Amino acid sequence: VRQLTGDISEHGRLKQLDRAVGAFEQIFAEGLHPTGYAYSTLLNAHVLAGDLAGGARVFEAMMASKCRPNLVVYTTMLKGFCAAGDMTAAVHLLRRMAHGSPPLMADIRALNTFLRGCVRCGDAVAARWAFEMAGSAWRVVPDGVAHVALARLLSQSLALKELRAHVEARREEREERLKAVAAARSASPPPPPADAPLACSFWAAGRCERGANCRFYHDLSVVQLDEAAEEADATDAQAAMELHLSHAGALLGKDALARDALRQARQLLAESSARGGGEAGGGEAGSEWAGGGGGECQG
C-alpha cells in the first residue's frame, strides 16, 4: 500500500490523473485496503488536476469507508471548491466538518484557504462569515494573510466604515504587540499572567509554528529564530491593508483619509525596506500552502 500510495503521490504531482487513479485501483486489485493517506493522496491528485467532481467522489468514498477524513483532507477538498469558485460548497464543507463525528474546526490554514477563494470570487459576505466563525466556534486568531484578504474585499466593496475600523484595529494591535515585546525585554519585565497556561516548549526553543494560535504560553522575552522575517511579514501586511484603505477612500472622495492611509503605508514600507523586507502584502502574507496529509482509519 505504501509503494502504491507513493505512486499516486508522484502521478498527482505531475498531474497524471489517470495513472494516479490506476495506482489507487491497484490497491484493491491486490486484495489490499487503502489507508487514509492513500485516499488523501488521490483526493489531492484530483484537486491538482482540476477534477473537482472526481475529488468529491473520492472524498465521499473515504467517508463511507472505515477511514475518516482529518483536517488536512477537509482542507484539500476545501481548496478544490475555492479554486473552482464554488463558495457555497466551501461553506457547506466547513459546516459539515463542524458537525461531523468527531467534529473538526477550521484552523488557520483552512481559514486562509477559504479566504483565498473569497478573494478570487469577490465574496465579501462569505469572508465576513469566516471571520465571525474564526472568533467564535473555530477559535482561530486570523493572521496577516487573513486580514489582508478581508481588507481587500472590503475595499473592493467600498465598505469604507467597516474597512477603516478593521485597519485601525490592526494598527492598534500591532502597536500593543510591539510595546509588549519591548516591555518583556526590558530591565524590569512584567511577570506572566496569573492564569497563563503551560509554557510552550517550542517557543522556548526558539520557534513555534502555531504563533498566535498556540494554546500554550509564549514568553515574549524569548527571541525567536524567525522573528525578523515574521515582523517583516506583519509590517508588509499592515502596509497592504493601509493601501486598500487609501484606495477605497480615494474612490469615495475621502481625500484626507486616503492621504493618511497612504502616509501610513509609506512609513511601513520604509520600515520594511530598512530591515530588508519586501513589498506590501509580500512574504508569508501572499504565500500559498502545499496540500497533503491523510485521514484517520477506524477499526
Image (tube, rainbow, N blue to C red):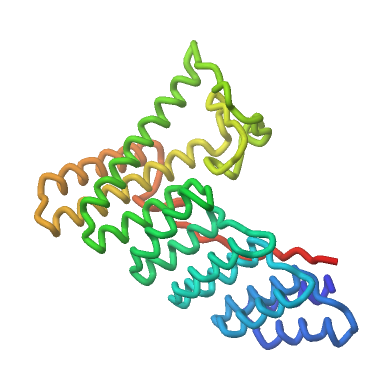
What residue is drawn where x is 20% and y is 56%?
A: 247
Instruction: Please state the horizontal and vertical placement of residue 297, each as a whole percent of the image.
Output: 79, 66
Screen quadrant of the N terminus:
bottom right
Q: Is residue 289 left or right of residue 148?
A: right
Residue 4, above or below 233: below
Res. 9 in view: no
Instruction: Please state the horizontal and vertical placement of residue 90, each as a whole percent of the image.
Output: 50, 70
Screen quadrant of the C terminus:
bottom right
Q: Nearer the viewer, residue 48 or 78?
A: 78
Instruction: Please state the horizontal and vertical placement of residue 80, each as a whole percent of the image.
Output: 54, 74
Residue 30, above or below 169: below
Most extreme residue toward the top, as rendered? 188
Q: Nearer the viewer, residue 7 or 214?
A: 214
What residue is drawn where x is 85% and y is 77%?
A: 33
Q: Is residue 114 left or right of residue 203?
A: left
Instruction: Please state the horizontal and vertical placement of residue 123, each as a whole percent of the image.
Output: 35, 68
Most extreme residue toward the right, as rendered? 31
Q: Nearer the viewer, residue 286 or 192?
A: 192
Q: Nearer the viewer, residue 239 or 160?
A: 160
Looking at the image, how many numbered discs can be counted on the residues? 0
What residue is drawn where x is 40% and y is 37%?
A: 275
What residue is drawn where x is 21% and y is 60%?
A: 158
Q: In the rendered image, which quarter is residue 69 located in?
A: bottom right
Q: Is residue 89 left or right of residue 176?
A: right
Res. 261 in view: yes
Residue 85, above or below 141: below
